[in-house]
Each structure stands twice: as C-alpha cells, then as structure tokens.
C-alpha cells in the first residue's frame, strides 16, 4: 500500500502493506521545491512538443500543402510508428529513465504524429484549425487546473477512470472495425466523439499524477508526463478538426 501526505514543505509517500509492520515500510520524501521544478519542466516540454506539431500544421493549412504529393508514405505508417514508440515506453518502463533512449522514443513519436496530421489538415482552412487549437488549449489548461486544485472527491479516481477507459477502448475498437469494413463516415464521427470524451476524462487524472496528488511519486518521469499532455492536446485538436470536417460533409 502507498499513502501520500502533502504538507506545506514536502510530499511524503509511504510504501508498504496495509496491515504489515510499519518498520518494513519505505518512505519517500519529496521537497515541495523539487515538485515545483518538476512541474515547470513537464509543462515547458509539453508546450515545446505541441508547438512542434501546431506550427507545421498551421503552415500546411494556410498553404494547402499536401505532404503525400512530395513524400509518398501512407498516413497509417506514421501512426503505426507513433503507436510503437508509445508501446515501448508503456511496456518497457526502464526505457522511460534511460537516456538517450527515452528522448529518441518521445521525439520520434512527436515527429510521427506531426507527419500523420499533415496528411489530413490540408482539408481545413487555417481559421478553423486555429479555432480548434484555441479551444483545445483552453480545455487543456482548465482541466489541468481542475486536476491540480479541485478537491479529489469531485475528481475521477483510479477505479472510475479505469472502468471508463476500458469501456471507451472497447467502443473505439468496435467502431474502428466498422469504419474500416463499411466505410461509413458516421462511424468515423462516433469514433472521434468517443476519443474526445476519453481524453477529457484522462486529463484531470493525469494532472493529479503530475502534481503529486496520486499514490505514486511522479519524479523522474518528466519526459513521459510531457508526452502525455502532448498526446491529449493533439487528440483534442484532431478530433475537433474532424468534427468540423464531418459537419461540412453532412451539411455541404
């Protein structure tokens, strides 16, 4: 079992069995200044990652640039490579702390997601894209503030988050298969809606972890925490761009 006690000067994590002897517990004490520096590093890196994708996308929308005309690599290749990097970071936790392996995986994922988005965002005008970026930024900031400062009784706990996450993943799998088999745009719209809702739920939970409010010390995972913020932001932007595309498709 792990208990967390936060006071004005430190974050104290107590690891041990619920009914076990107290002498066998391991106590991890993290100074508040260290946590503050950690949070700054996380949000700074996340902002850099987001700009790496947003700037090329905005230029591509403004110029109506089609990357497939100059670089004939299917979009799913970039998405698959990004998912592989994420799977390595998730399934092999030691890679998160091993430099430069962690930097290579994270930067590779950011680059692959940027190239993936370049295949589709030329379909939108730059004003629509910038509005999507603005809304996604506001939602990201508000939900992170909620996760950092709201009472934990009103925030989703680990069990609730896990259950909704499982339900959303199953829904995404079903509608993804239906989209590929039937090629009906309505399944693509539902897929984006479910993905958007899933991210809205995950952001406050992720914010609690970054701010040391969960039962696991986040120190040492600044790069991975920054990547999670980037992924949430990119998914929201792409989802809202998809909403705009489907709106024009059904009303055009």
Image (cartoon, helix red, strand yellow):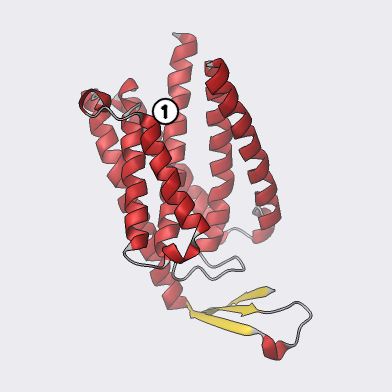
Q: Nearer the viewer, residue 153 or 233?
A: 233
Q: Tell me the residue at 60%/83% (across/down).
A: 27
Residue 157's x, y, as percent?
Answer: 67, 56
Q: Residues within 10 Å of mark 1 (few under 14, many from 20)?
A: many
Q: Give the x, y percent position of residue 185.
A: 52, 17
Q: Which image quarter holds the N terminus?
A: bottom right
In the image: residue 115, left or right of residue 189:
left
Residue shown at the point (47%, 77%) measured from the top left: 32
Q: Is residue 73 positioned above or below 89 on the image?
A: above
Find the residue positioned furthest to the bottom. Answer: 23
Q: Is residue 117 visible?
A: yes
Determine whether 28 is above or below 209 in the image.
below
Quadrant hosting residue 220: bottom left
Q: Residue 117, located in which quarter of the rendered image?
A: top left
Q: Position of residue 42 (x, y in %)?
A: 39, 61
Q: Is residue 44 visible?
A: no
Q: Nearer the viewer, residue 91 or 123?
A: 91
**Residue on which disc 1 sits:** 241
**Residue at left offset 69%, top offset 91%:** 23
């Amino acid at each position: 079992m792990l208990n967390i006690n936060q006071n004005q000067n430190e974050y104290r994590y107590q690891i041990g069995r619920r009914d076990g002897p107290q002498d066998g517990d391991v106590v991890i004490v993290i100074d508040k200044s260290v946590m503050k520096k950690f949070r700054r590093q996380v949000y700074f890196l996340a902002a850099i990652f987001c700009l790496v994708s947003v700037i090329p996308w905005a230029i591509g929308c403004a110029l109506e640039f089609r990357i497939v005309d100059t670089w004939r690599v299917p979009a799913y290749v970039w998405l698959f490579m990004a998912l592989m990097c994420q799977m390595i970071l998730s399934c092999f936790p030691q890679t998160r702390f091993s430099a430069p392996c962690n930097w290579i995986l994270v930067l590779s994922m950011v680059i692959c997601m940027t190239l993936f988005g370049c295949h589709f965002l030329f379909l939108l005008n730059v004003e629509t894209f910038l509005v999507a970026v603005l809304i996604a930024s506001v939602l990201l900031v508000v939900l992170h503030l909620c996760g950092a400062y709201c009472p934990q009784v009103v925030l989703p706990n680990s069990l609730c988050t896990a259950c909704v996450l499982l339900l959303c993943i199953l829904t995404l799998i079903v509608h993804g298969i239906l989209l590929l088999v039937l090629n009906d745009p309505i399944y693509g719209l539902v897929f984006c809606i479910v993905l958007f809702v899933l991210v809205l739920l995950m952001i406050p939970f992720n914010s609690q972890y970054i701010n040391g409010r969960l039962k696991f010390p986040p120190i040492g995972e600044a790069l991975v925490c920054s990547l999670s913020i980037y992924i949430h932001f990119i998914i929201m932007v792409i989802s809202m761009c998809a909403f705009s595309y489907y709106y024009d498709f059904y009303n055009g």
